[in-house]
Amino acid sequence: MSQENVDLEARLEEQEAFEPPESFVEQANVSDEGIYDEFEENWPECWERAADLLSWDEEYDTVLEDDDAPFYRWFTGGTLNASYNCIDRHVEDGAGDRVAIEWEGELGETRTYTYEDLLEEVNAFAATLRDLGVEEDDVVTLYMPMVPELPIAMLACARIGAPHSVVFAGFSAEALATRMNSAESEYLVTCDGYYRRGDPLDHISKTNEGLEDVDHEVSDVVVVDRLGDELEHDLAENQHDWADLVDDNRGETVEPVSRDAEDMLFLMYTSGTTGQPKGVKHTTAGYLAYTAWTSHAVLDIEPDDTYWCSADIGWITGHSYIVYGPLALGTSTVMYEGTPDYPEKDRLWEIIEKNEVDIFYTAPTAIRAFMKWGKEYPEKHDLSSLRLLGTVGEPINPKAWKWYYQHIGGGECPIVDTWWQTETGGMMVTTLPGVNTMKPGSAGPPLPGIDARIVDTQGEEVDAGNAGYLTVHNPWPGMLRTLYNNDERFISEYWEEYSDEEADEWVYFPEDGAKIDDDGFITVLGRVDDVINVSGHRLGTMEIESAIVGVEGVAEAAVVGGDHDVKGEAVYAYVIPEDGYEGNDDLRDQIVTGVEDAIGPIARPEQVVFTPELPKTRSGKIMRRLLEDIASGNELGNTSTLRNPEVVDDIAKEVQGD
Ligand code: WTA
C-alpha cells in the first residue's frame, strides 16, 4: 500500500464530517441551502415544485386538502397518467432514442430499451391486458424477478389505470396467495423462472402452488418465458405465454387513461407487527411527483445520466428509484437480474465500468459484503464515471460508509444516506448532496418541506444527543393514503400514537427510534416495533412466529433480530417443543422449511434455539429485549424481574454454543 493510501485511510478513520466536492456542487440540481427556508415559508405550496416535474392532463386546483386528516389528498382536481409521464412525453420531446432501461442478465446477456422501444412494449402489453379483460381499478399482481417485463408490466398497468401489486419473487407460494387474496386480485403476471448464480430457478411451480390457495377465481395468468428449454412446464388453460400475447398486439397504441390525482397507482404489501401484511396504497400524482422530486433533488438525476439502483423492484426502493422516479425524469436506468458475486465478486463494478454509471444507489448490507470480499474487486475496474453514491434500507455504520466513500467513490463522490419507508413512498431524511455536509452514520436533516422531529414517549421533543422516536409532523405528497381496505388499521398503525385527534393535529409515527444532533442531523437507530430488518428486507417477527408455531411439534416460539456483521440483523428463533417432541435437528429442519414455505428464504432463521421455557415477566410477557441481547451477544442486564430468571443462562449458553 502506498504512503498516500495509508495517509488517506488514517484521515478517513478520524474524520467525522465530509464536505461535498466543489465539482459536484457546481453541477448539482439543488445547491442552494435557501431551499430549506423556501419550503418552510411557503408550505404546502412549495410542493408545486414537485408537481411541476410532471405533465398534467388537467391542472390541479389545490395542492393539499386536509379536511379529512389523516386522509390527506394532494393535487386535487388534477388528472394525469403515470405511464405517459414516464415514457410518452420523453418521446414527444425528441428523446425517443435515449436509453430508458439497460438490462443486464445474470448470464451476461443484455437488453437495451430506448424510450421509443419502451413505449412500444408498454403499449403492446397494455393492449394485452385490455384484451384479457383488465379494467380500470382492477388490481393486477406481478410476481416477477428482475426481468425487463416487470417494469413493462407495471407501466402497462399504469397506462390503463389498473393498480399493480408487485410481490417479491423470493417470497413463497403462500405469501403470493395471501397478497392476491387480500387485494382480491384476479390477474397475475409471472415468470417461468430466472437465474441465480448461473443456475435456472423454477418459479412457475411456486406460482402454481400459490394459485391453489387463492380463494377466488383467477381469470388469467401471463407467464414470461425466461428459461426457454431449460425448464419444461405446462401452461394451464387460463395461462398464456407473454410473448404470444404481446406479439399479437405489437404495434397497437393504447391511449393513456387520464387518472385522478388521488387514484391508486399501486399497492405494495409490507410487514407489520401482526401476521397479516399491510397493503400500502400509493396514488398517482402525489407518489409520482414525490419520487420525481427526490430523484431530482437527492439523487441529482439528469436525463443524460446513467443511473443504477441495485435494489429489487419487488421492494419499494425498486418501485420508486428504479422505475417511477428515474423514468419520470427521462434518465437511463440500469437493471441487473442477478447476484453481486456472479460469476465473480466484481460483477457490480464491471457493470458500472461498462455502462459508465454516474449514480449508484445500494444497501448497507451489500456494502458490508463488498468490504468483506475486499477492495481488490472494485480496484480492478475504472469507476471514475461515478459522481454520486447512495444507500437505503437500514442504518449504515461509519466504517462501511467510509469504505464506500473511499473504495467506490474514490473520495470524490458525495454519499446520500436516505431514510424512508414503503409507506413514505420516497426519501424523507437525508442530506442534499449539493448542499449539506455529510456525517457518516447519520442520515442527515429532514428534506425541505418535511417536519421530522425526535420525541419521547410523551411526544415532547428530546434534547440533542438523546434517543427518542422519529415522528413526522406534517403530510407530504408521497405518503401512503391508507392501508388497502383497512382505514382503521391505517390510523392505529401510524397515527394514533402521537396525534391529538381532538385538536386535529396529526403526527405520523414510522416506528423507528432515532436521535438528533445540534445541527439537526438525524441518526436512525432502528425499528422499535416487532419488525426486523434483515439485509435491508423488512420482516415481521409475528409472521415468522406464526410460521414456526404452525410446524408440528412446536408449542411456542419467539422470534427476534440479533446483530449480524453483514445482514445488519439476522433472525433468531427461540422455540419450545411440544410435549412428546424433542428439539433435535429434524425439528429444526422442519422449522426452517416451515418459515421458507410461509414467507421465503429471506426469513430463514440464522439459529433455532430449543428451550423448555422462554424468559417471561411476572405478568407473563415474553422478554424480547433479553432475547435480542442474547442473540446479539450483548451483556445481559438485570433479570431479577423475571418469573423464571434461571432459563436465561441456559438459553445464552445454547446460543453461544458452549
Ligand atoms: C429502515 C425501505 C436507517 C427503517 C426504503 C425503516 C433505514 C425501514 C434507512 C423501512 C436508513 C430505511 N437508515 N434505517 N437510511 N432506510 N431504514 O419499508 O427502519 O422496506 O422504517 O423501506 O427500513 O423499510 P422499507
Image: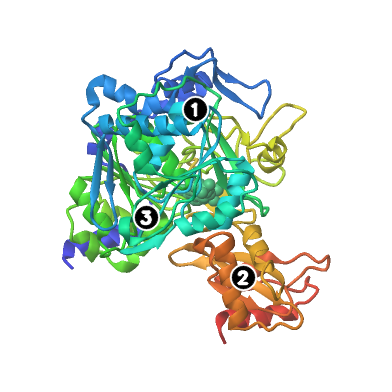
Residue 435: x %, y % from top left:
35, 35
Q: Residue at x 26, y 29 (%)?
A: 116
Whichever of labels 2 and 3 marks the residue nearer the N terminus, that label is 3
Amino acid carrying mark 3 in the image: Trp
Q: Is residue 459 above or below residue 265?
A: below
In the picture, the disc for residue 401 is: 3
Q: Are marks 2 and 3 in contact (CB under 8 Å)?
A: no
**Dot 1: few (<14), some (14–19), or many (≥20) neighbours within 10 Å?**
many
Q: Position of residue 612 (x, y in %)?
A: 73, 80
Q: Is residue 328 left or right of residue 110?
A: right
Q: Residues within 10 Å of mark 3 (few under 14, many from 20)?
A: many
Which of discs 3 and 1 lies nearer the camera? The answer is 1
Residue that appears at 49% across and 27% down: 161
| Quarter of the rendering occupied by the C terminus | bottom right
Q: Residue type at mark 1: give it.
A: Gly
Q: How many marks?
A: 3
Rounded to the nearest whole Å, what is the CA distance between mark 2 and mark 1? 43 Å
Q: Is 477 left, or right, of 116 in this rendering? A: right
Name the kind of residue labelled 2 in the image: Ala
Instruction: Label 3: state its secondary structure.
Output: helix
The reply to whether dot 3 and dot 1 touch (C-beta < 8 Å) is no
Task: Examine the image and state in which quarter residue 342 appears.
Answer: bottom left
Residue 610, how many percent across, how many down? Answer: 65, 79
Write down the residue under mark 1.
161
Q: Nearer the viewer, mark 2 or mark 3?
A: 2
Q: Check disc 2 and report the residue beneath it.
A: 573
Can residue 482 be spotted in the picture?
Answer: yes
